[in-house]
Amino acid sequence: VTLARTTFILDGGQPVILAGWVDFDGRIRYTIEVPVTAQLAGQTLGSALKGHSIVIPVSGTVDNPVFDTSGLKKSLDSLIGEKNMKKVTDFLDQLRKDLQR
């Protein structure tokens, strides 16, 4: 088992924290923590939600990660609202693509 916790910055300056483990047989158990920023949620809402994060559990294998997005839209709606939901959804789609490289 290899444990890891790292912070990286995506294009555009959005921080993402990845924490978890990879087993020798390729199984994974991670959490992706995305701090709510003005860039992600909009200037006013980002300032109001400073210090909050969106946490996405990831399991499965290195070759086939499974993102547990159940309830994610509901929690995002309550945090961010529908106006900025498209930005968040686009960000999460890009994050998934980046992590699968």
Image (cartoon, rainbow, N blue to C red):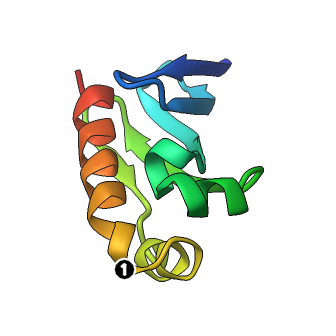
Seen in the picture, residue 101 relative to 33 is either above or below; the reply is: above
Image quarter of residue 98: top left
| Residue marked by disc 1 | 82
Residue at 51% from the left image edge and 71% from the top image edge = 80
Give the quarter of the image for residue 99.
top left
For the image shown, how many numbered marks are present on the structure?
1
Query: Mark 1: few, some, or many residues within 10 Å (few <14, many ≥20)?
Result: few
Position of residue 32 measured from the top left corner of the image (x, y, whole percent): 55, 42
Callout 1 amino acid: Glu
Residue at screen point 53% across, 18% down: 8
* Residue 62, visible in the rendered structure: yes
> Quick one: 51 or 23, which is closer to the camera?
51
Does the rendering let one see residue 49? no
Nearer the observer, 15 or 68? 15
**Residue at horizontal 47%, vertical 80%?**
77
- Residue at the front extreme? 44
Residue 68, by quadrant, is bottom left
Instruction: Please tell me whether mark 1 sits on a helix, a strand or a loop.
Output: helix
Position of residue 65 measured from the top left corner of the image (x, y, whole percent): 33, 42
On screen, 19 above or below 67? above
Most foreground residue, 81 or 59: 81
* Residue 64 coordinates in the image, percent (x, y): 26, 40
Whether residue 10 sits left or right of residue 86 in the image: it is right
What residue is drawn where x is 32% and y is 46%? Answer: 91
Query: In which quadrant is the C terminus drawn?
Result: top left
Q: Is residue 62 above or below residue 94?
A: above
